[in-house]
Amino acid sequence: MRGDFLAPLKAGALYFAVVFAAGFVLGTARTLFLAPQIGELAAVALELPVILVIAWTACGWILRRVAISAAVAARTLMGAFAFALLMTGEILLALAFGGTLGGFLTSLGEPAGALGLAGQVLFALFPLIRRSPASI
């Protein structure tokens, strides 16, 4: 029983780490180079498909390596834990770069932030979407 609970947490932590690392690199490039040229919303719109492909690929790889059950509960736990870690990481990054929690939350209601949040929700749903062996 304990292994049934720990495996999705382990997979969620690994999924978060891989995607957060890729997102940090892409987000830095977006913020420093792309957004000043084309605007924040357009930059996020260009970055989002790339990070979602990375997340989809990482999710499938992790699901095979960690051998997560196809059960809805296990996949939901993996995605929810990864999402919680991702949001925590995003908040900590915002604070580290001089932002505030209120500023971070406010940014989620702006077009670029809302688009990014939609992508983060998809990230969280990928373990559940990839339940069937045919989609992995």
Image (spheres, rainbow, N blue to C red):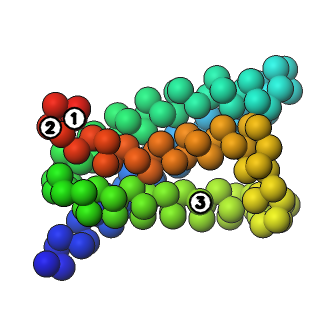
Answer with mark 1 or mark 3, whichever residue precedes in sequence: 3
Report the residue that reaches farthest toward the bottom.
2
Task: Kindly identify the residue that appears in the image at 68 percent across and 64 percent down.
Answer: 92
Residue contact between numbered discs 2 and 1, judged by CB atoms under 8 Å: yes
SS class, disc 3: helix
Tell me the CA gap for discs 1 and 3: 26 Å
Q: Position of residue 132 (x, y in %)?
A: 18, 40
- Element marked by disc 1: loop
User: Is residue 3 in view from this perspective?
Assistant: yes
Nearer mark to the viewer, of 2 and 3: 2
User: Which residue is denoted by mark 1 in the rendering?
Assistant: 136
Q: Is residue 33 left or right of residue 135?
A: right
Q: Is residue 9 left or right of residue 102?
A: left
- Give the amino acid at mark 1: Ile
**Crowding at label 2, few (<14), some or many (≥20) Cα neighbours within 10 Å?**
few
Of callouts 2 and 3, the N-terminal one: 3
Q: Which residue is mark 2?
A: 133
Mark 1 crowd level (few <14, some 14–19, many ≥20, 10 Å Cα): some
Indicate the amino acid at tag 2: Pro
Q: Quadrant of residue 27?
A: top right
Q: Is residue 97 visible to us here?
A: no
Residue occupied by mark 3: 87
Q: Secondary structure at mark 2?
A: helix
Tell me residue 78's x, y (percent). Answer: 34, 59
Q: Position of residue 5 (x, y in %)?
A: 24, 73
